[in-house]
Amino acid sequence: MDINKLSLTILLLLAWLCGVLVTAWSSRLITIREITLVLILFTITVITVFARHSKAAALTAFLNHHTRDIMDKQLADLKEAHRKRISSLKDEFAQLSQSMQRTINRLQHDYRRLNIEYDFMIDTYQDTQRTIQELEDRIVYLEGLRSRNTATERTPFSAPASRVQFSDPPRRGPAGSRGPATPSPLSQVATADLGWT
């Protein structure tokens, strides 16, 4: 138990006062009642000083004894708080990672869809251009045929007059007279068709 200088001084003064009082009582200068009062005051002062110092020493000893436990408890609390914080950060990171992955997958899907639509539009455009070119070529070809047909229609289909020869029709004899029997042209055609002689 530690005693400071003020407490030691008070105790020494009280001890000296007690010695003086005992000496005065021995020489019959004071009564027993006064000595009793001084002794009671001295006892109360000594008990107060020792109780205060013993309380401070007990508190110091208690704190020194339990400081390790308190520090361990605080360290355990800090570790638990740190673990909870790390766990919450990991969960948040996992959620953000999943959200970003879903966003990336959606964007990749949209990109592939746009590429497919772009390729389809390019193919459609090329097919349309090819069809238009074929139609233009066909129109040019048909216009060429039309111009040639128009030139053909302008040329006459009949032969020249010098080359046209018609056979003379058969002549009849005078009315009422019959010459030698000659077959009519109509009967010749029928005979030729039937194979008669």
Image (cartoon, helix red, strand yellow):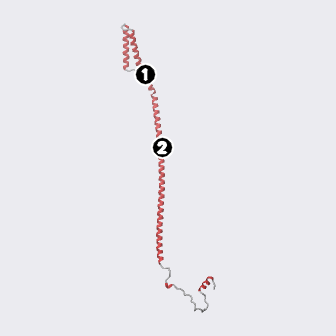
Q: Position of residue 52 (x, y in %)?
A: 41, 20
Q: What is the CA distance from the residue labelled 2 to the residue labelled 1?
A: 57 Å
Callout 2: 10 Å neighbours few (<14), some, many (20+)?
Answer: few
Judge from the rendering whether residue 39 lies leftward or rightward of residue 153; answer left or right.
left
Q: Nearer the viewer, residue 17 or 95?
A: 95
| Residue carrying label 1 | 55
Q: Amino acid at mark 2?
A: Gln
Q: Secondary structure at mark 1?
A: helix
Residue extending furthest toward the top = 28
Q: Quarter-wise, where is residue 27 in the image?
A: top left
Quadrant of the image for the N terminus?
top left
Judge from the rendering whether residue 167 lies leftward or rightward of residue 82; answer left or right.
right
Q: Residue at x 48, y 60 (%)?
A: 124
Q: Quarter-wise, where is residue 13 in the image?
A: top left
Q: Nearer the viewer, residue 110 or 70?
A: 110
Q: Secondary structure at mark 2?
A: helix
Judge from the rendering whether residue 18 lies leftward or rightward of residue 124; answer left or right.
left
Q: Residue at x 48, y 66 (%)?
A: 135
The nearer-to-camera label among 2 and 1 is 2
Q: Position of residue 67 (x, y in %)?
A: 44, 28
Q: Position of residue 102 (x, y in %)?
A: 48, 47
Q: Position of residue 116 (x, y in %)?
A: 48, 56
Q: Residue at x 39, y 10 (%)?
A: 33
Q: Residue at x 41, y 18 (%)?
A: 48
| Residue carrying label 2 | 95
Above or below: residue 39 compared with residue 91: above
Q: Amino acid at mark 1?
A: Lys
Above or below: residue 23 compared with residue 60: above
